[in-house]
Amino acid sequence: MAKETLSVTDNRTGKQYEIPIEDGTVRAMDFRQIRVEDDDFGLMTYDPAFTNTASCRSAITYIDGDKGILEYRGYPIEQLAEHSTYLETAYLLLNDKLPNEKELKEWVHNITYHTMVHENIKRFVDGFNYDSHPMGMLIGTVGALSTYYPDGKDVDDAQARELQTWRLIAKMPTIAAYAYRRTRGLPIIYPDNAMSFPANFCSMLWRHVSEKDYRPDPVLEKAIDVLFILHADHEQNCSANAMRAVGSSRPDPFSATAAACAALYGPLHGGANEEVLHMLNEIGDIKNIPDFIKRVKAGEGRLMGFGHRVYKNYDPRAKIIKKTAYEVFDVVGRNPLLDIALELEKIALEDEYFVSRKLYPNVDFYSGLIYQALGFPLEMFPVLFAIPRTAGWVAQWREMITDPEQKIARPRQIYTGAREQTYVPVGQR
Ligand code: CMC
């Protein structure tokens, strides 16, 4: 049988090395033994943006980017979107199994009864300018939760970790809704424990203060839940990596989640759905699409909502979201930008530039159209991504904290700057 090793010859010295291969991977540290002189640092690997480096072992989310497969703990995303709920899926991500009836009831109860935030939080959400971006408010506020829960620092205590998990998953929609209502100048609506997770979120967003029997349309409630399931985790993406990297210095998970939210905020990650809508608005009409595509191909901007570091096929979440979009449009009316999106997708899927680079619609291409049809302003889009992704971030954080192989994340560098300069006083420079 062939050996599971890699033979390396260092042509600088003629020395040979045998590097073990495990799970299709070589360990970067195994290269450190390769050196010219005994006191050399040893060979490093260089991988900016981690394009070919596994940073952890993980049993949470599986992606086959070539085949367009996404599974949480082995369950296909299509089955979860059809049959599960966001809270059940969150349990699955965090616990490695689907809950039985009793476990699910307890779990839902624990999340539901942690949705309230300290009254002070209302005051500092009020302190933000009325036109503040709600994602900025979310980042600041979730980070501030760490000041309310000092037991969050007990990261080695499994029970404390579980409690912070409930708090984080439960309070994100409340903070998001507070931020939304702040931008609208509306009074706060407190969580309603009699409602499901997505219905309570709708209530905190849209309920009128004097409305007693608010119930969201069940199609919209379900659509939000499906969107939450689809966004719950996506293995080592930029924000999960931020959660793990920050969490590796062992602060409380509220602080690490603020960092993950900040990573999500960027237009190349969770901010992309907002950018898709800006792009569709800018195109404005189907007749302008060919000109827009020409500009993208000339390198003057990107087709937002297309392309993915891992998927080199249609993102399975985009397929489900496209179907959900039609269900939502049946209730609230068709988003007029849909026709531009559909035509854009059709042209891009046939165009050699996109085909040869394997650029397909990703999760953000259609989600923004649904959010807009539901009445959300564009700035809320990344917030709507952050709420469900919290389950994934916390699952990744818990896995990292309990992984004996993990240490503080601390990459190396190749230093390219000057050395051994002599300081010259300012007047003599
Ligand atoms: N439009 C036009 N060209 C593109 C696009 C795009 N959306 N995405 C990639 N390319 C081109 C890129 O110019 C490059 O071409 P060339 O080889 O000629 O230089 C090639 O495709 C490879 O691109 P890359 O930038 O090396 O790929 P990456 O893996 O570093 O980037 C990405 C992945 C998602 C950042 C990128 O595809 C992108 O910017 N997409 C638009 C933003 C977006 O939709 N982001 C959401 C991602 S999914 C949800 C999430 O993670 O939050």
Image (spheres, rainbow, N blue to C red):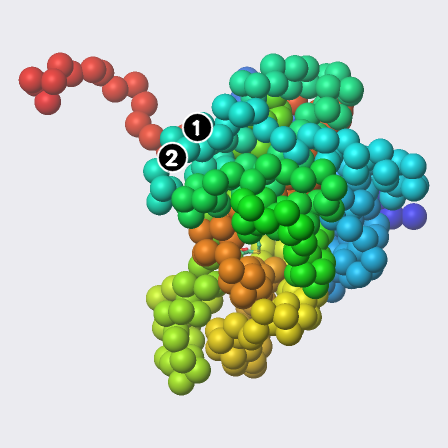
Residue drawn at x 44%, y 41% is 182
Q: Is residue 119 visible?
A: yes
Q: Position of residue 303 (x, y in %)?
A: 46, 67
Residue drawn at x 10%, y 22% is 429
Q: Position of residue 16 (x, y in %)?
A: 69, 35
**Depth order, front residue of 318/237:** 318
Quote the CA–CA distance across marks 2 and 1: 7 Å
Local SS, label 1? helix
Q: Is residue 44 visible?
A: no
Residue drawn at x 44%, y 82% is 286
Label 1, residues with CA under 10 Å away: few <14, some 14-19, many ≥20? few
Q: Quadrant of residue 195?
A: top right
In the picture shown, does residue 217 fall above or below 384? below
Q: Quadrant of residue 47?
A: top right
Q: Is residue 332 left or right of residue 56?
A: left
* Residue at the disc numbered 1: 124
Residue drawn at x 56%, y 46% is 210
Q: Position of residue 310 (x, y in %)?
A: 63, 55
- Please state the total of marks drawn on the protein image: 2
* Mark 1 C-beta closer than 8 Å to ligand 1: no
Q: Position of residue 264 (x, y in %)?
A: 53, 44
* Mark 2 C-beta closer than 8 Å to ligand 1: no
Local SS, label 2? loop
- The kind of residue tagged 2 is Phe
* Residue at the disc numbered 2: 128
Q: Is residue 343 left or right of residue 302?
A: right
In the picture shown, does residue 274 fall above or below 262? below
Q: Mark 2–mark 1 contact, CB under 8 Å?
A: yes
Q: Is residue 292 left or right of residue 271?
A: left
- The kind of residue tagged 1 is Phe
